[in-house]
Image (cartoon, helix red, strand yellow):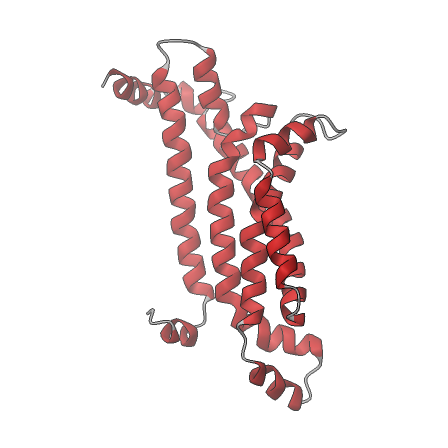
Amino acid sequence: MSVINDAIVWFNDPLNWTNPGGIIDRLQEHIEISAFAVLLGCAVAWPLGIALGRRGAASGVIVLLSNLTQAVPVMALLTILTLTPIGLGMPAVVIALAVFSLPALLANAYTGMRQIDPEVSEAARGMGMTSLQRLLRVELPLAVPFLATGLRIATTTVVATATLATAVNGGGLGMIISAGFGLGPGHGGQILAGAILVAGLALLIDAVMAVIERKLTPRVLRRAAGRM
């Protein structure tokens, strides 16, 4: 129980919140890293998943890309990136986490497009809509639940994994945990506090993304899925 008490004491020290490198600074870094990584992942995965989903003949490519990105551990990718001109720091972390976010984003974007009833697209074509109009007005709104689900999974996973940024001096809440280990025995409270911060942030982000997912899903689709 002494470690828990030490963690409580550590949280109650105002300096651990406001000092440079304290909770507020590290939390801001963690959120920035995660946000940039997810945005980069979306910029790559969504256009590709949507395009392949509309064609409907590249399910093997989706599986291959997902397997490739999942097969490379984030830590290994971080190590490789630090040996390139990218070097240490936040850019390497953002790129590695963006790659890590691709499977969920890509697979859900592809699935979202494939689940659209072809008759709906044909009806839109019959109304004189161009390919772009069908995509923006018909297909993407129907695919929103899948896109939102992929975004939620990717965001929560990236937030939890961003703790590894400390390995390449990339910042984030992992730096608090790393500093605790660096101080040696007797500083388990700081290590536990850092772990609680990461877990708490991941749970909070997941809850927020769940609300966003629900709000983005059209009411008629929620009813069809049995959700209010």
The image quadrant where one finds the N terminus is top left
Give the percent coordinates (x, y) of residue 50: 63, 65
Give the percent coordinates (x, y) of residue 143: 53, 69
| Residue 56 shown left or right of residue 194 in the figure | right
Question: Against 103, is 213 above or below?
Answer: below
Which residue is at a point 53% across and 60% down the rendered structure image?
108
How many labels, in total?
A: 0
Q: Residue at the left extreme? A: 1
Question: Against 13, is 33 above or below?
Answer: below
Rendering quarter of residue 190: top left
Which residue is at a point 43% across and 74% down the rendered structure image?
221
| Residue 173 shown left or right of residue 62 in the figure | left
Q: Nearer the viewer, residue 19 or 57?
A: 57
Rendering quarter of residue 171: top right
Give the percent coordinates (x, y) of residue 2: 25, 15
Question: Against 57, is 61 above or below?
Answer: above
Which residue is at a point 45% across and 67% down the rendered structure image?
217
Which residue is at a point 51% across and 22% down the rendered structure image?
21
Q: Nearer the viewer, residue 55 or 175?
A: 55
Rendering quarter of residue 193: top left
Q: Nearer the viewer, residue 207 or 56?
A: 56
Q: Is residue 44 visible?
A: yes
The image quadrant where one finds the C terminus is bottom left
